[in-house]
Amino acid sequence: MENNKENQHGMSLIVQNTARSIKGLIFLFGIYLTISGHITPASGFSGGIVFACVFMLMTLAFGKDMVLRILGKTTAYLFNCFSALLFLLMAYLGVIFGNGFFDNFMKKMFPSSVSDGFSAGLIPFYNIVVSLFIGAGLFMVFIIFAVRRVIEINGKRILISTEFFDITKKGKS
Amino acid sequence: MLYTLCFLLFLIGMYGVTCKKNIVKMILGFLIMEYSVNLFLILLGWRKQGIAPVIEDSIGPDMLITKSVDPLPQEMVLISITIGLGILCLMVAIAIRLYQKYGTFDITEMNKLKH
Amino acid sequence: MIETLIGMFIVFMIIGAIIALETTDLLSAVISIGAIGVAVSICFLLVGAPDIASTQLVVEVLTIIILIKATIRHDLVTIEGDREFFGLTVTIALLFILFVYGVKAFSSLPKFGAPAISEFQGAASNRYLYSGFEETGSKNILTSIIFDYRGIDAFAQLCVLFAGIWGAFAIMRVQSRKRKKKG
């Protein structure tokens, strides 16, 4: 029970204030890495991991209740599965409109100048989809590791999940 | 010379995987092997006074072809790093399950306490 | 110059690896792994791969958080030795033989600083470098290779990551909740 209380309150006040003021900037940096993946040395992979890191920072600072309220586990599953499906769909669009699988047909349809942000056809969209996939998936795994815990009852070890206890406790009080 | 040092790092990781009793130490050995292979592939594509394969205002495609480093190993390594993270999650999950079943991270203890 | 610098970093990594494998405290072992990862990231930055360096740095942070959060809580300090003496000796002898033959194999590789693309004009990377910007419109050649020329690589990566994440999730599933609902 003491552990549950600790997790509800999170870390100390200094850490909480720092995390609160810094989390928007880190999220913005992740968006920058993702959007500008075809112009600067960055890609959707690092952007997605930065997204996951923001939620991890919030989990460590404020406790897992707040994060589960903002971005539930079900939302993370949906983001993960549908972005993977969308990636396949975008690759398959090349068969319909272009020459084959993974054909960059938008580049041929709308040739634009270099200074344009979206000069690369489908590549920025691929970056966005991949960053959503990786961010949601890694956040999911982390929240699973943070929530599950091995405890010992009557000499027998079992694996329990602590998220439901916290929510019901909060609803009662 | 650098390739030999990378290979030494790989062998140290392999020693950790094969000779250690603790599961966490085995996972760490696996991570060391992954780092050394990634580093080796990147070092294989380096050119003297090489620049990153990014086109800028002063660097055109015909300048890139004589000066840039090899982009193909970099692409493989970028994919391999991200896969490594997923594999790490799987390994840690299996380690926690084994701890729940046997109460220890030690492999020789697990052999003794067969359920 | 850059060769000696990278060599020093790799020696640092070897020392870190030995400390990580031989120490008796699990927490200091995980922190040593973090030091190795940061050194790898600096090496990537030195040899002209900035996007991989940034990705490696972020992945390193995540690796340490997952390892500490998931494994350290269960038993913090373990004092452990190696396996039996006979097996250890045989393994180290086999690793030494592997080392000797591996060093011989390295002499057939291209020298450090002279990659294969500078010698063979028809290599695939040369075409990517020369006409990548024209054909895909992406200024970063790496992104154009990942999502256009070799898109199936990225697709396979997505499949493997999906399987890994959902496999970890399935292994960590709690079964007692179902029984409560039934009963």
Image: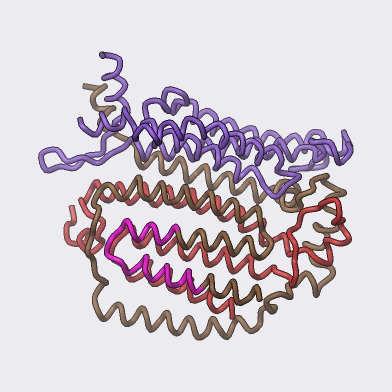
Any magenta on residue C17? yes
| Front residue of this view, candidates A172 and B22 | A172
Residue farthest toward the top in the current orientation of the protein: A172
Chain C rendered in what hue? brown
Return the x and y of residue A23 as percentages of the image width and height: 52, 33
Q: Quadrant of residue C43?
A: bottom right
* Left or right placement of residue A67 versus residue B70 in this view: left
Q: Is residue C99 above or below residue C151?
A: below
Furthest toward the front, the residue is A14
Label tally: 0
The residue lying at 70 percent from left, 78 percent from top is: C110
Q: Residue at x 32, y 28 (%)?
A: A9
Residue A104: x %, y % from top left? 79, 41
Q: Which residues are magenta?
A: C11-34
Q: Quadrant of the C terminus of chain A?
A: top left
Relative to C141, is A44 on the left or the right? Answer: left
Q: How is the image coloured?
A: by chain
Q: Main secondary structure of the magenta part?
A: helix
Q: Taking C80 as reference, is C168 left or right?
A: right
Q: Position of residue C127 (x, y in %)?
A: 83, 60
Magenta region includes residue C178 = no
- C168 shown above or below C86: above
Chain B tint as drawn: red
The spot of residue A129 in percent (x, y) is: 64, 35
Please tell me the colour of chain A. Answer: purple
Q: Residue at x 80, y 57 (%)?
A: C128
Is A71 above or below relative to C126? above
Q: Residue at x 57, y 55 (%)?
A: B80
